[in-house]
Image: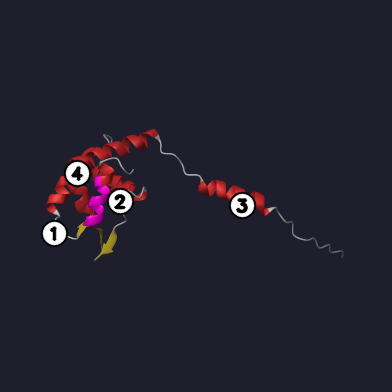
Amino acid sequence: MNLTLTAPTMTDTRKTDKRKTAREGKRRGSSASTKRRMNVIRRQVKWNLDTIEREYVLVSMIARDDLITLLRLEAIAPSRCRTEKERRAAADNDLQMLIAKEIVQRPKRVNGKYRFEVEPLLHDLRLFADGKIG
């Protein structure tokens, strides 16, 4: 019974570190359809932003569902969305896209509902509507 023990092979960490940083540091570019969609959302926000400013002057928080309704994001749902449920899901997806791209801050969970703070939300949406962010 002859056992031969070998030392574990060592890899050059400089090469693996470069590969990791290249993979993690690289951000995917947006596709043309995503850019088009963002422009449609931007126009919709710009058109309906004054409604939020008027209706939520004295309120500190706004529910996610109310924000979707006030921005009328269901109206810009793609034509393939035929039912109300599909349009609602598309509108929710559009709002989630704004959150994921960090155009709008993440909502806070209050009493089981997601709510946005009105002041920073209005500020961010104004900048987005003017084309300064996003």
Secondary structure of the residue carrying tag 2 is loop
Q: Which residue is mark 3?
A: 17
Q: Please, is residue 24 above or below residue 1 in the view?
A: above
Q: Does residue 59 belong to the magenta stretch?
A: no
Query: Rounded to the nearest whole Å, what is the CA distance between mark 4 and mark 2?
Result: 16 Å
Q: Please, is residue 44 above or below residue 12 in the view?
A: above
Across and down, in percent, residue 80 comes to 28, 35
**Horizontal side, residue 27 vs residue 79: left or right:** right
Q: Would you say the residues marked 1 and 2 are in contact, meaning their CB atoms lie under 8 Å apart?
A: no
| Image mark for residue 104 | 2
Specify which label sits upstream in the sequence, 2 or 3.
3
Q: Which residue is mark 4?
A: 72
- Please provide the residue range marked out in magenta: 117-126
Query: Rounded to the nearest whole Å, what is the CA distance between mark 1 and mark 2?
Result: 20 Å
Specify which label sits upstream in the sequence, 1 or 2.
1
Q: Quadrant of residue 45?
A: top left
Q: Quadrant of the N terminus?
A: bottom right
Q: Which residue is mark 1?
A: 58
Query: Rounded to the nearest whole Å, what is the CA distance between mark 3 and mark 4?
Result: 47 Å
At horizontal 22% and vertical 40% (from top left) the residue drawn is: 44
Along the line of sight, which residue is nearer the eye, 6 or 36?
A: 36
